[in-house]
Amino acid sequence: MKSKSGVCQTGALYLLVSANLSAAIINIGTGPDTSYVTLETPNLGIRQYAISYTYDPVNNPLGGTALLNLIEVNDPEITFVINDFGSPGQPNEFFSSLEFNGQTEINDFSPGGSAFSYWVAGGQAGAAGFGVPGPVPLPESVWTLGAGLSVNFRLIEPGSNEALVFAPTQLEPSVAPIPEPTSILLLFLGSSGLIHHRRRI
């Protein structure tokens, strides 16, 4: 990734077919916590990642750039370019382009151009400086348009979702945010309990 900051970490790359999705999810990284990234562009279609790491908001807080670094380190088909309009001590990073298998898609804000729109769910967004409000929590189950949100201003928490959609207009991702595995388990246990309760009545 061509950016001035970010955290990289290696991990195994493998495919897992999720019970609640028809598409396979690419799992990368190591650690007990998981966040998700969805890429949706004309060249690569929909590509989804489950990224494992160790959540440490005090000593090692992660931003959106860190997740993209993890994807690039572990998936040789993907290259991201991020431009930093800030300073080394106060980065202000925005997407520039994405390359997939030799096909480049550029963030083009000119009239009639196609641009990436950045969608987020769960976690927090915002940071001190640059006139951006302090971090605020985001709903987990719905996409929120992160227009104007610097990638490094996105604060990652377990279960959070990022989505980059490349289209002529700011289109919401065509897939829903991916729930945490623990959320799926709780939903399953809750449903099982309800069924068991009904059978006893």
Image (cartoon, rainbow, N blue to C red):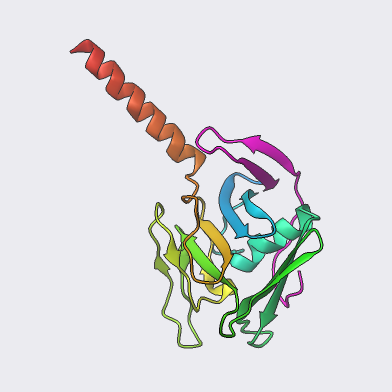
- For the view shown, which residue lies furthest in the top direction? 200
Q: Position of residue 116 (x, y in %)?
A: 58, 70
* Residue range of the region highlighted in magenta in the rendering: 1-30
Query: Which quarter of the rendered picture does the N terminus lie within?
Result: bottom right
Magenta-colored segment: predominant secondary structure: loop
- Camera-side residue of 23 and 191: 23
Query: Which quarter of the rendered picture does the C terminus lie within?
Result: top left
- Camera-side residue of 172 and 9: 172
Q: Position of residue 161 (x, y in %)?
A: 52, 56
Q: Where is residue 173 in the image (x, y as percent from the top left)?
A: 50, 58
Q: Quadrant of residue 192?
A: top left
User: Total marks drawn?
Assistant: 0
Q: Which residue is drawn at 22% across and 11% down?
A: 200
119 with respect to 201 (left or right): right
Q: Which residue is drawn at 64% across and 76% down?
A: 107
Question: In the image, is residue 44 above or below residue 31?
Answer: below
77 with respect to 37 (left or right): right
Q: Where is residue 178 in the image (x, y as percent from the top left)?
A: 50, 47
Q: Does the segment drawn in magenta span residue 3? A: yes
Q: Does the segment drawn in magenta span residue 128? A: no
- Camera-side residue of 172 and 49: 172
